[in-house]
Each structure stands twice: as C-alpha cells, then as structure tokens.
Amino acid sequence: MKKMILLFFICLSSAMAFAQQTGSIRGIVTDRENGEVLIGVNVLVKGTYYGATTDGDGFYLISDVAPGDYTLEISYIGYKVVQKTSVQVVANESVTINVALESSPLALGQEVEVIGEKPLLDLEETSTVRNMTAEDIDKTIANDALQLVSQQVGVVEQDNEIHIRGGRTYEAQYLLDGISVQDPLSGTGYGLNISANAISEVEVITGGFKAEYGQATSGIVNVKTKTGGDKYEGYLSYKSDHLGMFKNESFSFNTDHYEFNFSGAEPISSKMLPWINVDIPGKMYFFLNVYTYLSDDYTRATATQLRSSIAPKISLFGSELTDETTFAPRQNNSWSALFKLTWKIAPKYTLTYSYNRSLSINQNTQSLQTNLEYVEPTPGFPYDFSKNLDNFNTFTHDNEQSSLTWQHTLNNKTFYELRLSRYYAQLRADWDGRHWSEYLQPVDVTRLPVTYFNPGNDPDKVRVIPGDGFYDYGNDFTWHDHYVDWFTLKGDITSVVNDIHTVKAGFEGAFKEMQLIDIADPYVEGGFGSSQDIYRVHPADGAFYIQDDIKFKGFYLDIGTRLDWWMPGAFVDRAVLGDNSSFTEGLQEQYLDETFSVFGNRFKARLMPRLGVSHPVSNNMMLYFNYGHFSKLPRPQFVYAKLGESRFKSSFQRFGNPTLDPETSVKYELGLRYKLTNDDVISVNAYYNDIFDYIQTVSVPQVRRGIDGITYINLDYARGRGMEIEYRTRFAKYFSGSFNGSYSIITTKSSSSDDGLLLAQNLLDEQPIKEVFARWDRPWQISANLSINVPKGDNPNMFGLKLPSDWQMNFRWFAQSGRRYTPVEFVQIRPNDGRPIYQSTTDQTEFFSQIGKHWKWADLSFTKYFGIAGMEYGLTLEVKNLFNDQNPTIINPVTGNAYEIGDDVPEGWNDPRYPDVFYPISSPFPSDPSRWRTPRNIRMGLFMKF
C-alpha cells in the first residue's frame, strides 16, 4: 500500500509540473436540425473540475484549463449526450469547439454520441470495470464468452473454473442481457455460454459493484448480445486444425469450428405485410447466430462414439432427424444458438425477444462437481478410464433461455425496463444413456501379455502383476441428473432528477424448480448405490434496491443499498418443522429464530450498503474508492442434501443444513486512473476482500434424530488482497496495445468445503485452524497485447518494404505464477526395492504453501481481407501457444513441475521405476497427458461477410 501511495504522489507531481500555464475552451452549442442556439447546456471537461453552461447566445467559455488532451461531454435534456474526444488545449491559447446536438425522445443519458475515437478508459467509474466491445473482441483469440472473461486482469482460469479476484468459482454472477444464466447445481459456476461473435459487449466488474447487481461476492460478468439493423448482414466461417497435410501433425486435435450470423430488418413486417396493406407500427430487427465447436482435444484418447441421452431430438414429418449421437461426433462438442428479435414500436417503446441455447457433450469430469464424494480438483480428463472410455460417463449440459424485455421512456428524464425470463438447465452424467441399475463395478484386470515378477527377489516364486491401474471393465462411480427451471421477473426505473442526481431503483424475483438425482457407486446392490441424493425443491429469491449517482463539478458519488431475500421453499419447511421431521428440537428452534414468515413460508433477508467515490486529483487524473457488502446464496446441495428420505450404505454421509446463511464479503478498493493523452491511459488499483460465512463440513452428533453424521455450517473465512496495473495505448496509426499486471494473495481456512469429510475419512490429520493459501491462489500475472490493423487502401512501409493493405494481426503474451501445491517430505528409502518415499506434510501452515513452475504462452492471429463480386472474404490463421510452452496442470509435489520420466514421486503415486505389483494397483503410471496444459494448436480458416 505504501508503494501505491508513493506512485500516486509521483503521478500527481508530474501532472502538476505541466500545469503552470493555462488555456481555454470555448464554443457555441446549437440544435442540429434547425441551427438554433441552446441555452443552459452543460459542458464538462471529463476527468477534471472544469465546466460551464451556455448563455443566452448558446455560448460557453471554460477558462484556466491546464494544457493537455481532454474529452468534452455536452448534455441537455431532450438531446443525445455528446462526447468530443481529443480536445487539445495549448498554453495561452483558446480552442474553439462548436457542437450541434441531435434531439432525442429518450431520457437523458440513454443515447451517447462519440465524436472522435472512443476513449480507452472511463475516468469517472467508481470501480474497476473492464469492457470489451465487438471491435475489441475481434482482436482476441477466443471462442466464447468464458474465454473472453478468462483473459481479463484479476481473473484466474484453472481446472475449467473461473476465479475472480480470489473468489471460489461459484461466487461470480454471470448475466446475459441483464438476466442470470448460472446453473446453481452444476458446481462449475456458470451455465449458458454463447459464441464470442454474437456478443456486442462484455463487462467484467472485479471491484465493488452498484446496488443493482447481486448474488455475487467476487465479481460480475455481464454479456450483451448483438442486435440487427436496417441493412441485411451475414457472416459465415469455418476454421480447422486438420486441413489436408496437417491432419496428423502434433498441433492438430481434429478440431472444427463452424459459425453463421445473419441479421437485418425482419422481412415479414417490413416486406410481406405491407404488400397486403397490413402495417405494423415501428420497425423490427433480428439477429441470428449459430456456432459449433468440435474437437478430440490434445489428450488423444477418444471413445468410439459418445451418446447423449438428453440431446435435442429433432423430427420432421414423423422422421427422426437426430438421435443420441448426432450432436456428439467428437470427444468435445459445443453448440450454441441465439435468436434475437427487436421491435422498435416507437422511439419511446422497444420490445425485445431473445432465445439462447447452448449444448455441451464431453467426458470432462469437471463438468460436474457432485456433492456425494470428495473429488480432487484436476483438469477433468478421466485418465484412469482412458483405455475404457466407451464405458465411461458422458456429460451433457443443456442450457436454454427465453426472455422478453420491455423498455419504455416516460419522458426526457425517466425510463424503465421490465424483463421476464425463463432459464432451463439440465446436466446428465450417464453411460451410454443407461439407467444407474445397469452399471457394473469398474475393475483393473491383467491383460495379455502377462507380466511376471519375483516377490522379494526370490527366484523360486513367480507372481503376475495384477493390472496396470487403468480400469479395463465396468463403469464410472457416479450417475447424475439434475435440472433447474427458473423464472425471473426483473424491473428497473431510472430517473434524472436534476443535473446532480440520477436515481435508479428496481426489484427482482426468481422462482425455481430444482430436481437432483445423484447416485454414488450405482453398481452396489440395493438399487440406489452406496449413497444418494434425491430431491425436488421450489425455492425463490429476489431483491429490492435503490441507488443514487451523484455528479457535481467533477465529483462522482454512487451510493445505494440492496435488500436480498431468500425463501428455501416448502420442502425445507416440511422437512424441518413437519410432524415427521427428523430434525432435533434445537435445529428446529434455530430455523424459526433465523427466519421470518410471509404468507406461510419461511424467509431470510439481508441488507447490504454500497458506496463508490471518484474525483479528480489533477487534470485527467481520477482517484476512486468503493466499499460494499455482497452476498451469495449457499449452493443448493449444501441446503437440501438428504432432507428427504434416503438410503445409504456409506459411513460418511453429508446432510444438508437449512439454517445456512448466505456467504458474505466486504470489499474495499482504492484506485487511480490517469489519461496521459486520448491514446494513452494508465490505471492502478489496490483491493481488499474479506469473505465471511464460508461453508464447511463438520461432524455432528445427532445431525438427525438417532443419526450421527456430517453437515454444513457457516464456519470458514477467506481474505484476498492485491494490486493491479493496466496501460492501454494507440500509436502510429495502425497499432494499439495494452500491458497488464497484478499481484495478489488469497488466504483461507480451507480451499474446500469438504475438510470435515476428509477428517472423518482420515484423509486429513486435523482440520486447519489457521489461514493457509487458497488452492487457486496464483500471486502474479502479466499479459501484453499488440494489434496491428491496416485498413483497405493503405500500404505501409516497414524496413523499406511496402506491405499489403487490408489485414489485421493480433498478438497476446501471457504469464502467471504456477499452481499451488502442498509440499512433501522425504521419509526413507524403501528397503525392499530402494524407492525413495515422500509423504505429505502434516504441518497445517504448509498447506498449498509452495508454487509450481510458472505458466506462459503466446497466441497469434492473422487475418487477410479481400473482396470479390461485392462481398468481403477473409483468410485466417490462429496459433495458440505459439512457442509450444509446457505449462504443468498436475503438479508432482516432489519437483514442483509436471511428472517427467525418471522423477521421484510421492507415496501413493505409481512410480514406473518401482511399479506397484500387488493388487490393487494404486494408480496408473503418472503419465496423464492432461498434466500439461494445451500444447501448440494451429487453425486455419475462411470466412465470408455479406
């Protein structure tokens, strides 16, 4: 913190050194249509205290402005807001900026017109917000929204999980056009996913966020989809890494991308109905996107054919067009579709319908994080089953959302929005579409040719090595199916009260049906495995909020409060308070004390304040601070597990706790933004997050009447603190780029909610009592981006060479610290074979104290555009991990790197130099191909725009 404050003063001193002489800005503001002068228009110099109001002649004068590059903001009720960038002020001179405003029927601030190049940074934000527009997205190598998010500062992607500023994967909120699309039962933290080419803007809020946002303790991801316009536009593309002679190369993973966009004026209302003299008021526009990603991935192990039992079934005239294999031709299959219809009934009325669907089919175990058994975080490749993938589970995640949005401008100061949405998500994990009763226990058997050994080096005794650690027959250890049917009603109203206050208020109600069937060890006799969760519940949650954005002479204050409410549902009320309840009287009293009754249902509620401040400390330099309380509902499994009737044979059962409170965080952030020029900006921030009421398992006597077991309580906490720096630039006409860096430390009582379970299973010697590093803590992160965009008709010279025109190249280099791991200690040399024995440390302070080899890679993309017959075409080349860097994802704690042949390994690993020879074999040799991150991948493609 001391270093950051010093940096503030250095920047401040540097800026003030140039502020000895001043200039001025003057001009006249008129109506664009009739040329009449406008009186009382606000003219502000963004990022400063400077400002003026036009007089009776429409004239304004802003004096004593320090030399520099500024952005003017001109606003007047009944007109579009105008931002004029690159206003150059020179000492002892006056610059004239005349502006003609365009009238608008919408409320002030709904429409903003930028004259000049768009600012690289919003100096007035009171929090850390990173926006990517469609133009920015075009400069990245990303297939979908999640890959775009993972490239932002402060975001860590690990084991198919997204962590924002140290939060657990489920603690972020994922919004699509303002509505949550987060599957609460999947455990991965996200649900519906869409193509990057269907996105108009991605907003990632990693600092404190306003009262309008909720159900998040780490960050907000808000994805806005594209909308059609008056002109018909289309896009068709294909990319592949196995074209022709490259099919068998190491950089080929048998990957194909297909994508199609089409948008424009809706033809029925604009063409067909007028032809028969039927006129519909206003105009309709549509946008359509269809995206497919198919790959066998770099692990090279594939099943003969994946089968999805819940994939969409399409038929035509009674004939089935698709079956359970149609959408799963490869090992990793992703599909998405978006259709958006916008009806601009009148300038003040807009109705939008949107339908989105995504489907993923694969054998990635991280698709599901079941609640019945502890699963060690891994990249998700089922290495133990890699010789038997035909009998392993297929994971199908189907997400579907339909929404209707109504926007109405009441007057030139006030507008409101109403959203009605239905989100449906289903995840099925099964083998070949079979019922769980058909599962067989997985076994590792001896294969031909048989391998012999002499036990104890006795030449008179011969034994057969009983397998190799891979499962040769049988099926997976889990059968799972869940669905969420989620209806949301959301309303917001925004009013510009006066030049100082803009008030926004709203409500949200979400009503859900959730069903889960989770069977552990389904092959165990009795019909329901060794353990199971089966429930169907109908919870509801929502919020009311109000916030005031205060703007006064360059000073900005966001203040608000949010009331979150939660109804666990009648299923919980009956289980806890019903006549046949198995809960003890103490738990029943606790449930009654911590909830309140509304219309016969029990509720919980929490009030959370939010505050953000931003103000100039010098010209084009803004200091900002934010503070707030934030909460996230507990995962449904923590609440509902085994509340109903259940049968189990396992000794270690986890019972849900309906008295759980939401997890809560208190966040602080202090930052500085400095606009050196319109083409150069820098931002620095420091943050501190306190997270309370983390959920943990504990062993409890009488968790139910007559039953001792393990349940969940609000016990743990975590802390995240760090600093981030970002520099963005545009230079030399064709170039733009950025540099980002961050340093953070994330500590917690535990990195898993399962410590109580591990303790009961003797997999943990003692539950941690001190803070340790979080499993996903990656202290430092650096990235650099460079884009070169040469427009049509330009032929720049480089080193005496004349380059072609109409092309674009993007380069990204990224590095971050390695994965954390718990160190091992050398114990002894095993007497019978000389193997060195390493065991995990039992010192709690050493949990995840070590950091493995750092990660680094570079991505490159190149696009050449050309036109034929009035249509635009393009050839693309994408190279991921350009230098083929090896980045370890599974750490050998002896070396701090991924396993390589000849390395010592810890106890419990099957060392090829000293192989396990007695049944059961502990595991296969540690040559899992997913122990390294994705190697170099080269894709080439062709697209067409019309």
Image (cartoon, rainbow, N blue to C red):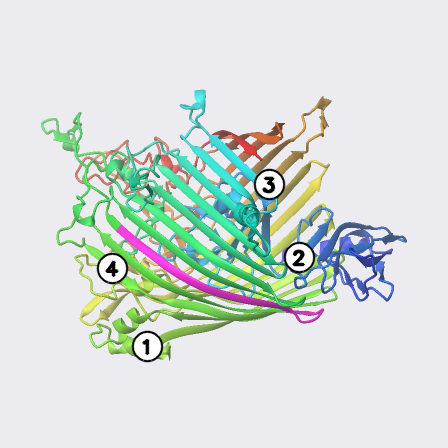
* Residue under numbered circle 1: 590
Asked if the magenta segment contains residue 608, the reply would be no
Task: Residue at 43% x, 54% y: name it.
Answer: 401
Q: Does 570 sit left or right of 157 as displayed?
A: left
Dominant secondary structure, magenta: strand
Tell me the crowding category of disc 4: few under 14, some 14 to 19, or many 20 or more residues within 10 angstroms, Cα based.
some
SS for dot 1? helix
Mark-to-mark CA distance, 3 and 4? 48 Å
Q: Amino acid at mark 1?
A: Gln
* Residue under numbered circle 3: 784
The residues colored magenta run 480-502
Mark-to-mark CA distance, 3 and 1? 53 Å
Q: Amino acid at mark 4?
A: Ile
Task: Residue at 24% x, 35% y: name it.
Answer: 388
Q: Which mark is residue 111?
A: 2
Q: Are marks 2 and 4 in contact (CB under 8 Å)?
A: no
Along the line of sight, the residue nearer the viewer: 173 or 407: 407
Location of the N terminus (image quadrant): bottom right
Q: Earlier in the sequence, mark 3 or mark 1?
A: 1
Asked if the magenta segment contains residue 481, the reply would be yes
Tell me the crowding category of disc 3: few under 14, some 14 to 19, or many 20 or more residues within 10 angstroms, Cα based.
some
Q: Earlier in the sequence, mark 1 or mark 2?
A: 2
Q: Earlier in the sequence, mark 1 or mark 4?
A: 4
Q: Earlier in the sequence, mark 2 or mark 4?
A: 2
Q: Earlier in the sequence, mark 3 or mark 2?
A: 2
Mark-to-mark CA distance, 1 and 4? 25 Å
Q: Amino acid at mark 2?
A: Glu
x and y percentages locating residue 710 in the rendered image: 26, 63
